[in-house]
Amino acid sequence: MTFAPGRILVLILAATAATAVLTGCTADDSGSQRPATPAVSAVPSVQLADAARHLQQTSFAMKLTIGLSQGTGTLTGKVDPVKKAGAFTSTTSGRGDDRTITEWRMIGTTLYAKSTTNGVATNAKRPWRRLKSEPTDGLAKSFDAASMAQALTKATAVQRTDGTHFTGTLDGATASSAFGLRAPTTSAQIGASTPAPTSVAFTADIDDRHRLIGYRATLTSSTGDSRNASIVFSDFGTTVTVQPPPPGQIVGSTIG
């Protein structure tokens, strides 16, 4: 089984191809806990950017939901960006009752994946695949939940509508990249009658401790399809424990 490169989020959710982790080499059984964001700016764009950056300093749970060309994909799990460990489950629904579930374990730059489609494992005896660390590490940077939130540090026209809610716009390419989509760069890619979007509206939320707890946007894929995407962050400071699968259940893999 060969894993192809590309826009990793969509490939993971659409084809269970690959996922990513933050760089590093250590797993730990304790969550990384940091104090809430200290000083709070009165400027909405700065408030939102600070909340997004705070995700690099603490462990958390997350749920990503994105529309695919056929069906819907979700990715749920926990990650500790300080301890460099994470575990996720991706679920995709396609035509009819087709359903693929992939379990991912990340320890530093090592990634393990186990998939089942409609309840049938891809390899019953050795269901786990270990991905090469160097390519995986490169792909990780495009599929890091905390990095997805960093797109908000580039937001414009940010307004705080009440104590916890924000609105604003993102550059279309920035927004698409944050969720792993390849954005159209010219109207020819999505049809002459539909100009390529240059900006994307988003909404975002923080909690009473000024931590980012989610944001959402409607994106346009390279084929011109509208894709609703959202990500939710919760359970800050959660314990993240990740162990490698038993050696006898692992086979190697390549990303080509």
Image: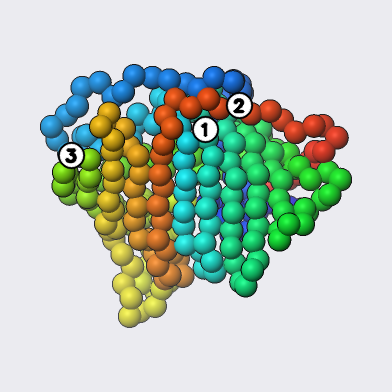
Tag nearer the camera, 1 or 2: 2
Q: Label 2: state its secondary structure.
A: loop
The amino acid type of the residue labelled 1 equals Val
Tag nearer the camera, 1 or 3: 3
Q: Label 1: state its secondary structure.
A: strand
The amino acid type of the residue labelled 3 equals Gly
N-term mark: 2 or 3: 3
Q: Position of residue 220 (x, y in %)?
A: 39, 64
Residue 184 in sight here: no
Question: Closer to the camera, 237 or 180?
Answer: 237
Residue named by callout 2: 241
Residue named by callout 3: 163
Residues at circles 1 and 2 in contact by the CB criterion of under 8 Å: no
For label 3, the crowd category at 10 Å Cα-Cα, with few meaning under 14, some 14 to 19 and many 20 or more, is few
Distance between mark 1 and mark 3 Cα atoms: 27 Å
Q: Label 3: state its secondary structure.
A: loop
Q: Is residue 17 above or below residue 226?
A: above
For this view, does 149 lie left or right of residue 118? left
Residue ID at (35%, 29%) = 54
N-term mark: 1 or 2: 1
Q: Is residue 149 above or below residue 59?
A: below
For this view, does 230 lie left or right of residue 37? right
Residues at circles 1 and 3 in contact by the CB criterion of under 8 Å: no
Q: Position of residue 236 (x, y in %)?
A: 42, 29
Residue named by callout 1: 79
Distance between mark 1 and mark 2 Cα atoms: 9 Å
